[in-house]
Image (cartoon, helix red, strand yellow):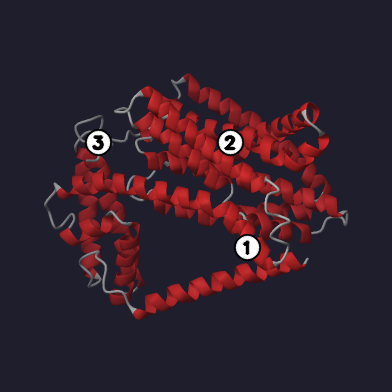
Amino acid sequence: MSEPVRPGTPRVASLARRPAFWVVIALLAAGAVRIAQITALFMKSFPIATITAILLFGLLAVPFWVFLDELDFLEREPPSLRILALAWGGLVATSVSIPGSTALDNLIAKLSSPDLAAEWGAALAGPTVEEIAKTLGVVAIVLIARAQVNSVLDGIVYGALVGLGFQIVEDVVFAIGAVQQAGAGDRVQPVITTFLVRGILAGVWSHTLFGALAGAGIGYLVVHRDRTRARRITVAALALLAAWASHSLWNSPLFRESLGDSAVGLLAVLLVKGLPPLLLVLYLVRRAHDREAAYYVAMLATVRDPDLITEGELRVLGSHTRRGAARRHAAASAGHRARAAVRRLQRAQAGLAVELSRAGADVPHDAAEARAAEVRRHRVALAALGHPEAVEGARSWRHTASTIATAVVAIAVLWVTLSALGGG
């Protein structure tokens, strides 16, 4: 049985009355100043490379953002808080981690040996400082907008966004570092190489993934009030430890020499180091999404009005795969306008479910009525296109062929990239 969600609606006026809000704003401002100073230094020495790096890694953030937006389809987080999470990772966490990781790396060298620090410093110092700094971003969201973290999935989304912000800024720094190390002036080739390695190859299982792991723990800590405090704190600590361990394994020198520098060896390193945390996050996402979906679908099932949602649409709305299948079916039967109309109808139905969960809590019931009217408008628009119901159709051979072709192209691109890097 899924527990009530009842998300709140953050208002700037109410947030401004909370001391934590102003602390976060001050930290963001300080981080922005620091990152602006670093960017100015890069622009002064390597303007073309810097602009190229910002554009490439900025564009890389777009598919991650879209994926996370679709992942939290049923109860979307406010854009202001999503931007805040992204900004925390890119401004605050990076500003803290750059000097913090260096200081801890130096401490490791002093307490042990310079050789150990050179070999394992990135695997010990980096994750220790960075994962704590990123997790504090999710904690900041909780402190200023507690009502918005009402499921483990919310913690995953906010954690992933913090990690995404960190990943983009760190990758730009690494790209300009590669330009400096090349010593060939303001060239873009080191930037492109860094983009292929850190963006294309490592991007899927990098900071966004680590942040999602830690964020899941914070979500559990906040949401599961039916568990003991000791258990919730333990789960949150284990999630942070899992993020640290995944990050440490990724940065470690393990398997680099034993698996070789060939394309096969590089692919093996990616899979051995990146696949376990990726599978763990996918499992957590699936469980959290299914739990949230069960609650909202059950809420809509009480409506019993086919103009708002049909039995077939109830089966579709709670599944990411089925929502996509319903859009493809609309496009195949009534054109791309119908596909967009189905998506709008699904958005409105999800919004209605959220408002129904709020009704009787801190939101007037007329908000649910307004959402219901929106659903009816989208229903009429969809019906006018000759496609009255947002349900999935039979799986076509075209979709199967498209899926196979996409997979083949992705594998080919990955193989060519690995071969080029391995050969270089």
Residue type marked 1: Leu
Dot 3: within a 10 Å radius of its alpha carbon, few (fewer than 14), some, or many (20 or more) residues?
Answer: some
Residue type marked 3: Pro
Query: Could you tell me which residue is drawn at 39 percent across and 43 percent down?
Result: 153
Q: Nearer the viewer, residue 125 or 365?
A: 125
Earlier-in-chain disc, 2 versus 3: 3
C-beta proximity under 8 Å, tags 2 and 1: no
C-beta proximity under 8 Å, tags 1 and 3: no
Task: Specify the quadrant that holds the C terminus.
Answer: bottom right
Assign a secondary structure to mark 3. Answer: loop
- Could you say where residue 148 lies in the image, as x and y percent from the top left? 38, 35
Q: Is residue 99 above or below residue 371?
A: above
Residue 24 appears left or right of 232: right
Judging by the rendered image, the residue that carries numbered circle 1 is 267
Residue type marked 2: Glu
The CA distance from mark 1 to mark 3 is 44 Å
Judging by the rendered image, the residue that carries numbered circle 2 is 131
Query: Could you tell me which residue is drawn at 43 percent across and 27 percent down?
Result: 233
Assign a secondary structure to mark 2. Answer: helix
